[in-house]
Image (tube, helix red, strand yellow):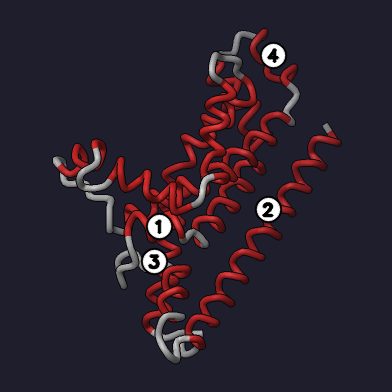
């Protein structure tokens, strides 16, 4: 494998893994909170929140990347504020992680929400009647039962982050060693003569990662269904 991929390909793979890992890790708490709120709470504007969560799946990725640039770019309101404390997102790998997290967020939330909705609310109500606080009910009753759904959501989000291209290249460009992930590297290799071989190698890596994520997610989904049937 070391000889099969060249330095530039390995650089793209390593950066994609780094970006995807931090994208999932950083968005996981917010994703779980959002999934729980949509599954269990009733509040004004719930459908609007649900629509906003799924908006990245509907919008062209380039539009999402442009909106991120407007908000988090050097001249954007959030980007300007972060820049004053030394945090730069645009044209940096951290910005690539943000773009990947935004694009993967809907898949993460959906998987977690389905897992939470599969839990019988009566189990949570029974724990609450015994005097347990809501946070304790969630930690001891809900969380263990939805853990497979959380893992499935994280895996799907990781795979989506690995394959993110449109929003990333719009927000952080295609800088070798800095923001050039696997999809950006494939695009770059296809723009130069003789780059087809390197591009194909990265395509194979992408397919293997995507298929592995889908198989793992399906396996976890079956485990969740079996647990629900046995409950």
The residue singled out by tag 3 in the image is 15
Quadrant that contains the C terminus: top right
| Secondary structure at numbered mark 3 | helix
Sequence-first tag of 4 and 1: 4
Q: Nearer the viewer, residue 49 or 140?
A: 49
What residue is shown at x 80% (from left), y 35% (from top)? 228
Label 3, label 1: how far apart the Cα atoms are: 13 Å
> Which disc number belongs to residue 168?
1
> Closer to us: mark 2 or mark 1?
1
Spatial CA span between label 4 and label 1: 43 Å
Q: Is residue 222 above or below residue 229?
A: below
User: In x, y percent, where is residue 172?
Assistant: 32, 58
Of labels 3 and 1, earlier in sequence is: 3
Name the disc covering residue 125, or none: 4
Mark whose residue sits in front, 4 or 1: 1
Picture coordinates of residue 45, whole percent (x, y): 54, 18
Q: Residue at x 30, y 40 (%)?
A: 71
Q: CA distance from mark 3 to mark 2?
A: 23 Å
Mark 4 to mark 3 CA distance (whole Å) = 45 Å
């Amino acid at each position: 494998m070391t000889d099969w991929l060249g330095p530039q390909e390995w650089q793209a793979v390593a950066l994609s893994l780094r970006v995807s890992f931090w994208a999932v890790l950083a968005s996981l708490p917010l994703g779980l909170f959002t999934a729980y709120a949509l599954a269990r709470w009733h509040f004004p504007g719930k459908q609007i929140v649900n629509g906003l969560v799924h908006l990245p799946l509907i919008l062209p990725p380039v539009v999402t990347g442009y909106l991120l640039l407007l908000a988090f770019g050097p001249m954007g309101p959030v980007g300007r504020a972060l820049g004053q404390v030394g945090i730069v997102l645009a044209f940096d790998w951290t910005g690539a992680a943000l773009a990947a997290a935004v694009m993967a967020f809907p898949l993460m939330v959906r998987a977690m929400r389905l897992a939470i909705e599969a839990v019988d609310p009566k189990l949570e109500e029974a724990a609450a009647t015994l005097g347990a606080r809501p946070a304790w009910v969630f930690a001891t009753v809900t969380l263990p039962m939805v853990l497979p759904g959380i893992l499935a959501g994280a895996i799907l989000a990781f795979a989506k982050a690995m394959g993110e291209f449109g929003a990333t290249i719009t927000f952080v460009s295609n800088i070798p060693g800095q923001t050039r992930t696997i999809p950006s590297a494939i695009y770059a290799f296809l723009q130069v003569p003789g780059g087809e071989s390197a591009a194909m190698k990265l395509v194979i890596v992408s397919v293997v990662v995507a298929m592995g994520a889908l198989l793992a997610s399906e396996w976890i989904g079956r485990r969740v269904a079996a647990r629900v049937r046995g409950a």
